[in-house]
Amino acid sequence: MVQGKWFAPGEDLSTVLPVRTAVFGRGADDLDALSWNALVFQDGIPAGAGRIWWEDGAYRLGDIGVLGSFRGQKLGDLLLRLLLFKAQSHAAKEVRLQCPRALTGFFARLGLKEESVSPSGFVEMMIPGSEIDLDTCRHCPKASCPNRK
């Protein structure tokens, strides 16, 4: 069973940090006091994490990752949707993130667009809050699906 859990800024992140450390090689930092963290569990086991925080007039997404043994199960997609839903529910004017070039396609599927590339090679992506669309059926190519209206 897949489950998600939110951790408010300042909450104990002892179940989130091992995932972040395993995926990104870093643990706690100064952003933790400002961030909402999402943790996804697969059969009760922490499998993926991500976070969102407010910075310079925009919501920022970061450290979105899934442990290697849980990849390919759409948990990263769920994490991204949870984070975008959090931004949308807080009336975000825009949502931004930086990611490696190889991951831009993953984020583009939900509407984030490339804006610039940093000197370190990371791509800055953005989506206006008004364009966040979490409806999975709207863009589905299955015309005969009974969920489609």
Image (tube, rainbow, N blue to C red):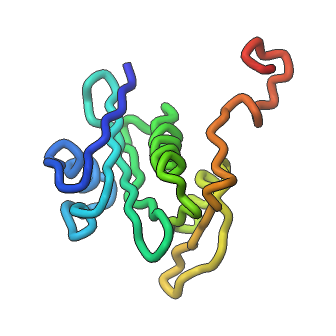
On the question of residue 67 being in view, the answer is no
Residue positioned 41% across, 60% down in the render: 62
Foreground: 66 or 7? Answer: 7
Residue positioned 67% across, 48% down in the render: 109
Residue 34 shown left or right of residue 99 in the figure: left
Measuring from the top left, give residue 88's x and y in whole percent.
54, 49
Note whether 84 is above or below 125 in the view shown: above
Residue positioned 31% across, 49% down in the render: 37
Measuring from the top left, give residue 123's x and y in whole percent.
57, 72
Residue furthest bottom in the image: 119
Foreground: 94 or 17? Answer: 94
Residue furthest right in the image: 143
On the question of residue 58 being in view, the answer is yes
Q: Quadrant of the N terminus?
A: top left
Note whether 96 is above or below 37 in the view shown: below
Residue positioned 80% across, 20% down in the render: 149
Residue 42 shown left or right of residue 117 in the figure: left
Measuring from the top left, give residue 53's x and y in whole percent.
38, 61
Measuring from the top left, give residue 84's x and y in whole percent.
52, 48
Residue 121 shown left or right of residue 11 in the figure: right
Foreground: 135 or 91? Answer: 91
Foreground: 101 or 90? Answer: 90
